[in-house]
Image (cartoon, grey):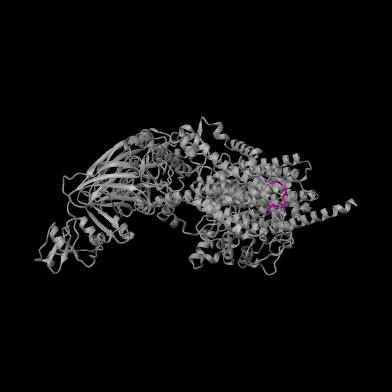
């Protein structure tokens, strides 16, 4: 490539000696200072973070109504930044952050990959303050992308200014700029760096060790940078480039003796560098592959890739045509579909694209240009599935699962290189036909501009009926945007014409500078504020609510009910342990169970339903409920949020009493929550609540609530409607009417009455009803007339299990009295033959994790345990109960007796089914003896029984509680199971009294260890074999690499 | 010779322009001059108006009206008569003993989808004749017209014929819709807004797409293109809300103007010695016209008629009676909601029932 060029070769050393690399690096630094001007100039006031999004949530709200600067930049504050802080904090404690105990009942942190623990771009977090690290990390990522692009171009004999132009074009490409807060931008630096070192190797036939080592280190650092998919595509381009270069070299030198052998050896060296590089990063890769295998990622992806959309092609010129979420001009956060970032990751600016197209004129004589032009074109066909090309690319192994929308960096780099090389050719000066060339450029530019402007107009027309209240901002933004971008393009083209036509080289350089400046203005400067800043006081604020919450909960496990919560993983900096998790991959079994028990919702996993059984399973000790509405074990909350459903409004005024009857299905009715709205100017009135037993008209409870109390929490600045709130015209919320527990409520009907003596129309509370509701199996009335359906309400039982500990803002913090500790002991166990059966068992209302553990029939279960505990087939057994009696018996036909099943634990572990119980008359079994709570009889009948626990035994002691190591002490008369409320994940090992024992998957997603009788010390450690294997591979790779380096030295010395 | 050196450049430039012209045509790009761009009726209908060979022509005061001699497309061989009305041309002078009835209204009055002898006007004459009343009808209906256009139609074209009775069938059908280019009928008629000067003829630019593209780019960057674009997009959005009361657009005739229009028409007709009747033509139920706003317009008509003492012929009642006697509702309307031949029969019947006592008294 550029073989006929007569410019002398430039090595790194000579480049540095001449100061070009230094000047290039400094120039790129200056551009970055311009890009980061906002966070730098306001360093004392702001953080370079989208943490202002946390103002949407009550717990972290400091300024109600604060408008988030960019609503779709959520991942950086819910994942990337909390993880980086966690990395730092763990390292400061002397621990490597292998495991995150604070989310998802524990989850792999290092194996998560995007946590990028050992990334060179995470280093600033370890040595600088948070504020400085946020900027430094972003700075480093972009600079690395730009600087190595510059070096690579210089290696390809591109002179200073065109190389700077190419470096700047790539550095400020959409993928890098929009994702600068993500690991993607850092991982993207692999592409130019790898190509640079590869080029050094290819050009220096004798002295290759340093660049080969550099290549290996590049691969290692790239693999540690935290984004495997971006690395994958970059590696593919590097490998293809090297292969193409080797083939060209072969073609040129095939007549030389030993040429093939030398080139094969060279290819081997490249492979070796790749293997060493991957080997050095194996300690990151292998745990990551293990996590992939145990994550939800594959089931989410479904192996069908979604090509990018061609309908938004005009946005390559006018990126903000349909809105920019970092400006007020936003039609929708899903426009352009699916969002701004995904569409604009391929954005390079119109001028760069145009110059790259112009550069194609030189493709015949410049093979580097030809290669990258071809690579860019191939990418277009692949990513946009032009003419169905994606399926051909998918034939290449692993391409089918790599997501297309992580490959845009390849496109940007190809454009940047083509544009740079084209600029180099122009800078060298055209000979005779420059006027013809200039005419062609001008004509092409006009066509280019016209085409994109016409396309933009059509895109606008296509979206003119899009439902949005922001169309009114059209005239404020769109015309200016189109004119601005067109002007930049026009000035850039004029500068390009100067580059083409000027005879004097300095004038051409000025022209090129003009082109580069316009390109920068259209990319870097245009997108500089896309990543927002957050005022200091809003960055992960220690609000009174958070301070109190963390003081009370400590390191125990908290469940926050509803959507207004602490989004995962922002709990990490606050050191608050929550059971939700957002790592983009999710430990599969845990996530399945979580969504089964708490509702199948979005990425932030809000709990929209809950049961006490689930709280025990997940080891929850604390519950935080907004408005005090603790909907554990109630059923209405997750229902009826469909968009467009309208509710009817009912004023609660004298004569406008609202009533609702409820049928209680259980004993222990203790609270009713009614969704009420209050008009903004209604401070003075009251609502009176009354609960009466229907039939006896006995007054069960009554209370009075002032409207001011409800209104104070519904102030328009204070209250933010969450997506799961009811779509009602006036803001409202659940208001709880709590009363002493009604012990015998089962089967009875109650009437709730809401009335007001001093409410007035326009100055009162409102209840809402929906015609299709039948949740309470009762009747609603208003003004003594029956309503269709029911009012919006819910009811709960047995709330005494939750001890109110504090009122924190709009929330009530409850201590769950029946909570199970992190590790607890059970005697009863049953084996589920498959996951479906396990879930079924866990869903049984009478299943209590305190009494019984469900073990999954995985390969981890040894044969003797399987023999002892399962399979159980009692499907042919007859179960009976007598009329008027709750006792359930197994019919022993041969022995002519009825054996009493003494409790629900025995029932469950023998896998009986409730629907199989027959109610019979006593006469059917007249004369048959019946046993009662007789262990012996149950055993003789072939049932599995659980020996009752002997009272007074020592509880389980936790001796060590570290993220990756727990030590328990158990002292029991009988063998027992230690059930640990930690997400089951391979790599956790258990040692009982020093001997390794298996860790079983328990309760679908957690861990269980069998403890023998007597006193035992149980050590539970995270020591994944994948990590160990990866580390050994790394050691071997390092030795191999060092050996190769030293061997060359010794050979030369000899 | 220097000029020979320029020849290849000229050739290339011509080739370039030619290629651009072809590309723009293939891409269906168009940007005619503003006189050609202004939307008067709708984009599709304006082609007909502009061509001056369709059923309608542009008119300075009536906005559009039937073109004399134009072929009526859904009929076998009917044309608009030389005076610009449907049906046989009447002599200016009235025949003694023959009641002259003028019809004003939109498409159902004109008789869209039916032959002349199936229109309610023709059937009315026939029915009256069978009852011994000699009558002739002047069908001044105009497809897509509003009462505002109807007033001008009466002034210019109907008044000279001195009709004894004028039957007007405007009830909000076209009044409630968005005015094209966000311009009301009153603004077009009174102030000439949004009325293009198509008589000027198309400029050269209107035939050359490259010239159009250049003009368009000029307007995009230096002209008022964005206002036009925003207005056009808003029109599309507002069209969806036209049936709601809070639609933010400009209707062709607002409800107060609808109400005032009836009073004005009544005054005009009475000044000329005639008598005005209002005909309430039913719409296809359940369609887009069955909206709260349409009912509001119809209410405005009823109140206007009451205030101005205009007898209101409620054809909906006749339709209802027809349905209860066995006619299927679908048989009363064409696909697009206009009255079918069966519907016209019922309209004529309702008019006969209303007019006969008046005519008998005369």
Lateral position of residue A154 relative to residue A134, left or right: right
> Quadrant of the rendered structure where residue A243 is?
bottom right
Lateral position of residue A656 relative to residue A259, left or right: left
The answer to whether A323 is drawn above or below residue A704 in the figure is below
- Give the residue displayed 52% in from the left and 37% down from the top: A136
Which is more toward the observer, A76 or A877?
Answer: A76
Q: Is residue A821 visible?
A: no
Which residue is outermost to the top? Answer: A44
The answer to whether A621 is drawn above or below residue A548 in the figure is below
- Whole-percent x, y for residue A95 in the image: 39, 40
The chief SS type of the magenta part is loop
Q: Is residue A720 part of the magenta span, yes or no?
A: no
- Whole-percent x, y for residue B66 in the image: 70, 59
Q: Is residue B137 visible?
A: yes
Image mark count: 0
Which is more toward the observer, B236 or A865?
Answer: A865
Which residue is outermost to the right? Answer: B1
The answer to whether B244 is drawn above or below residue B117 in the figure is above
- Whole-percent x, y for residue A22 in the image: 62, 38
> Quadrant of the rendered structure where residue A60 is?
top left
Which is more toward the observer, B286 or B311?
Answer: B286
Lateral position of residue B45 relative to residue A855, left or right: right
Q: Is residue A4 part of the magenta span, yes or no?
A: yes
- Whole-percent x, y for residue B22 in the image: 73, 58
The answer to whether A983 is drawn above or below residue B88 in the figure is above
Which is more toward the observer, A243 or A841?
Answer: A243
Lateral position of residue B33 relative to residue A97, left or right: right
Magenta segment boundaries in residue numbering: A1-8
Which residue is outermost to the left? Answer: A927
């Amino acid at each position: 490539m550029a073989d006929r060029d007569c410019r002398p070769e430039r090595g790194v050393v000579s480049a540095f000696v001449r100061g070009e690399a230094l000047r290039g690096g400094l120039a790129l630094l200056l551009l970055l200072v311009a890009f980061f001007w906002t966070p730098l100039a306001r360093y004392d006031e702001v953080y370079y973070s989208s943490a202002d999004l946390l103002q949407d949530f009550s717990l972290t709200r400091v300024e109600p109504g604060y408008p988030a600067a960019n609503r779709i930049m959520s991942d950086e504050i819910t994942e990337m930044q909390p993880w980086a802080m966690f990395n730092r904090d763990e390292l400061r404690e002397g621990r490597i952050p292998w495991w995150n105990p604070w989310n998802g009942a524990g989850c792999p942190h290092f194996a998560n990959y995007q946590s990028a623990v050992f990334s060179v771009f995470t280093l600033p977090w370890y040595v600088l303050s948070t504020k400085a690290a946020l900027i430094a990390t972003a700075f480093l990522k972009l600079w690395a992308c730009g600087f190595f692009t510059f070096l690579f171009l210089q290696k390809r004999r591109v002179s200073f200014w065109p190389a700077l132009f190419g470096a700047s074009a790539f550095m400020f490409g959409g993928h890098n700029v929009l994702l600068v807060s993500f690991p993607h931008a850092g991982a993207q630096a692999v592409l130019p760096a790898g190509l640079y070192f590869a080029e050094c190797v290819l050009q220096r036939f004798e002295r290759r060790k340093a660049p080969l080592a550099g290549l290996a280190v590049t691969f290692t650092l790239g693999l540690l940078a935290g984004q495997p998919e971006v690395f994958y595509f970059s590696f593919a381009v590097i490998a293809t480039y090297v292969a193409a270069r080797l083939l060209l070299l072969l073609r040129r030198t095939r007549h030389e003796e030993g040429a093939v052998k030398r080139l094969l050896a060279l290819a081997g060296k490249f492979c070796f560098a790749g293997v060493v590089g991957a080997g050095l990063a194996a300690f990151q890769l292998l745990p990551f592959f293990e996590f992939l295998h145990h994550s939800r990622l594959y089931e989410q992806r479904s192996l069908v890739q979604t090509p990018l959309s061609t309908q938004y092609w005009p946005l390559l010129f006018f990126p903000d045509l349909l809105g920019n979420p970092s400006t007020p001009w936003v039609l929708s956060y899903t426009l352009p579909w699916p969002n701004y970032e995904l569409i604009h990751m391929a954005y390079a600016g119109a001028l760069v694209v145009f110059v790259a197209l112009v550069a194609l004129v030189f493709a015949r004589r410049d093979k580097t240009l030809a290669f990258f032009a071809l690579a860019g074109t191939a990418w277009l066909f692949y990513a946009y599935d032009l003419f169905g090309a994606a399926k051909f690319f998918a034939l290449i192994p692993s391409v089918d699962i790599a997501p297309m929308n992580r490959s845009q960096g390849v496109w940007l780099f190809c454009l940047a290189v083509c544009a740079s090389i084209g600029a180099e050719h122009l800078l060298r000066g055209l000979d005779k036909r420059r006027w013809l060339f200039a005419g062609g450029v001008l004509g092409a530019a006009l066509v280019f501009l016209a085409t994109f402007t016409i396309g933009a107009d059509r895109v606008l027309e296509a979206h003119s009926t899009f439902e949005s209240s922001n169309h009114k901002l059209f005239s404020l933004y769109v015309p200016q945007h189109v004119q601005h971008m067109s002007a930049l393009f026009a000035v850039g083209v004029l500068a390009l014409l100067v580059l083409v036509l000027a005879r004097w080289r300095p004038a051409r350089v000025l022209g090129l500078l003009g082109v580069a400046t316009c390109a920068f203005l259209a990319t870097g400067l245009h997108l500089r504020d896309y990543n927002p800043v957050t005022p200091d006081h809003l960055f992960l604020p220690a609000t009174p609510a958070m301070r109190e919450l963390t003081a009370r909960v400590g390191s125990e496990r908290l469940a926050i009910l509803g959507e207004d919560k602490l989004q995962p993983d922002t709990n990490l900096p606050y050191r608050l342990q929550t059971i939700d998790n957002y790592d983009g991959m999710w430990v599969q079994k845990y996530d399945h169970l979580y969504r089964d028990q708490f509702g199948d919702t979005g990425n932030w996993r809000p709990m929209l339903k809950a049961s006490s059984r689930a709280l025990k399973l997940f080891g929850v000790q604390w519950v935080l409920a907004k408005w005090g509405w603790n909907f554990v074990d109630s059923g209405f909350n997750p229902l009826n949020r469909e968009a467009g459903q309208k509710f009817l409004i009912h004023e609660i005024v004298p004569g406008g009493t609202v009533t609702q009857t409820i049928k209680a299905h259980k004993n222990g009715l203790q609270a009713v929550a009614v969704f009420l709205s209050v008009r903004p100017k209604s401070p003075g009135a009251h609502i009176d609540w009354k609960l009466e037993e229907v039939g006896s008209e006995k007054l069960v409870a009554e209370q009075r609530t002032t409207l001011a109390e409800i209104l104070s929490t519904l102030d328009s600045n204070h209250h933010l409607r969450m997506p799961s709130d009811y779509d009602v015209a006036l803001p409202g919320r659940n208001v709880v009417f709590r009363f002493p527990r009604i012990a015998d409520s089962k089967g009875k009907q109650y009437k709730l009455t809401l009335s007001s003596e001093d409410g007035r129309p326009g100055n009162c509370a409102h209840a809402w009803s929906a015609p299709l509701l039948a949740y309470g199996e009762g009747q609603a009335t208003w003004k003594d007339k029956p309503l269709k359906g029911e009012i919006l309400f819910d009811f709960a039982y047995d709330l005494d299990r939750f001890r109110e500990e504090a009122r924190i803002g709009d929330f009530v913090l409850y201590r769950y009295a029946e909570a199970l500790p992190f590790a607890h002991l059970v005697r009863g166990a049953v084996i589920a033959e498959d996951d479906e059966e396990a879930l079924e068992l866990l869903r049984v209302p009478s299943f209590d994790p305190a009494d019984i553990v469900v073990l999954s029939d995985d390969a981890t279960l040894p044969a003797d345990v399987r023999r002892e505990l399962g399979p159980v087939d009692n499907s042919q057994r007859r179960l009976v109960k007598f009329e008027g009696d709750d006792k359930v018996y197994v019919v022993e036909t041969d022995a002519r007796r009825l054996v009493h099943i003494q409790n629900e634990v025995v029932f469950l572990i023998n896998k009986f089914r409730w629907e199989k119980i027959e109610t019979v008359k006593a006469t059917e079994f007249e004369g048959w003896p019946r046993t009662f709570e007789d262990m012996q009889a149950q055993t003789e009948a072939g049932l599995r029984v659980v020996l009752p626990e002997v009272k007074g035994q020592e509880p389980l002691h936790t001796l060590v509680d570290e993220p990756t190591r727990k030590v328990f002490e158990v002292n029991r008369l009988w063998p027992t199971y230690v059930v640990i409320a930690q997400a089951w994940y391979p790599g956790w090992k258990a040692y009982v009294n020093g001997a390794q024992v298996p860790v079983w998957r328990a309760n679908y997603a957690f861990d269980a260890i069998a403890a023998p009788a007597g006193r035992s010390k149980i050590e539970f450690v995270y020591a994944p074999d994948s990590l160990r294997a990866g580390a050994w591979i790394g050691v071997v790779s390092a030795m191999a690499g060092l050996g190769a380096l030293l061997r060359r030295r010794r050979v030369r010395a000899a | 010779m220097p000029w020979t050196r320029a020849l290849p450049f000229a050739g290339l430039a011509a080739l370039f322009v030619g290629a651009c012209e072809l590309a723009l045509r293939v891409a269906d790009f168009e940007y005619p001059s503003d006189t050609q761009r202004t939307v008067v009726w709708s984009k599709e209908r304006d082609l007909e108006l502009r061509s001056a060979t369709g059923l309608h022509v542009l008119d300075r005061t009536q906005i559009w009206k039937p073109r004399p001699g134009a072929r009526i497309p859904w009929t076998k061989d009917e044309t608009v008569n030389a005076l610009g009305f449907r049906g046989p041309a009447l002599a200016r002078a009235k025949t003694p003993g023959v009641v002259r009835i003028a019809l004003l209204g939109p498409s159902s009055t004109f008789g869209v989808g039916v032959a002349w002898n199936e229109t309610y006007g023709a059937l009315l004459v026939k029915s009256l004749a069978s009852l011994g009343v000699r009558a002739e009808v002047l069908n001044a209906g105009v497809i897509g017209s509003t009462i505002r256009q109807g007033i001008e139609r009466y002034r210019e074209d109907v008044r000279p014929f001195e009709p004894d009775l004028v039957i007007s069938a405007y009830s909000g059908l076209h009044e409630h819709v968005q005015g094209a280019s966000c311009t009301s009928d009153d603004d077009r008629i009174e102030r000439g807004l949004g009325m293009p000067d198509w008589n000027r003829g198309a400029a050269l630019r209107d035939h050359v797409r490259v010239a159009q593209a250049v003009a368009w780019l000029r307007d995009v960057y230096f002209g008022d293109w964005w206002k036009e674009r925003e207005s056009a997009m808003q029109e599309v959005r507002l069209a969806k809300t036209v049936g709601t009361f809070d639609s933010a657009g400009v209707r062709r005739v607002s409800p107060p103007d609808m109400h005032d229009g009836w009073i004005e028409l009544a005054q005009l007709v009475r000044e000329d010695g005639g008598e005005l009747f209002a005909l309430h033509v039913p719409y296809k139920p359940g369609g887009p016209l069955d909206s709260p706003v349409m009912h509001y317009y119809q209410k405005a008509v009823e109140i206007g008629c009451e205030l101005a003492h205009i007898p209101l012929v409620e054809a909906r009642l006749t339709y209802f009676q027809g349905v209860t006697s066995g006619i299927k509702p679908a048989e009363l309307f064409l696909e697009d909601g206009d009255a079918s031949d069966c519907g016209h029969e019922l309209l004529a019947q309702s008019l006969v029932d209303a007019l006969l006592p008046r005519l008998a008294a005369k």
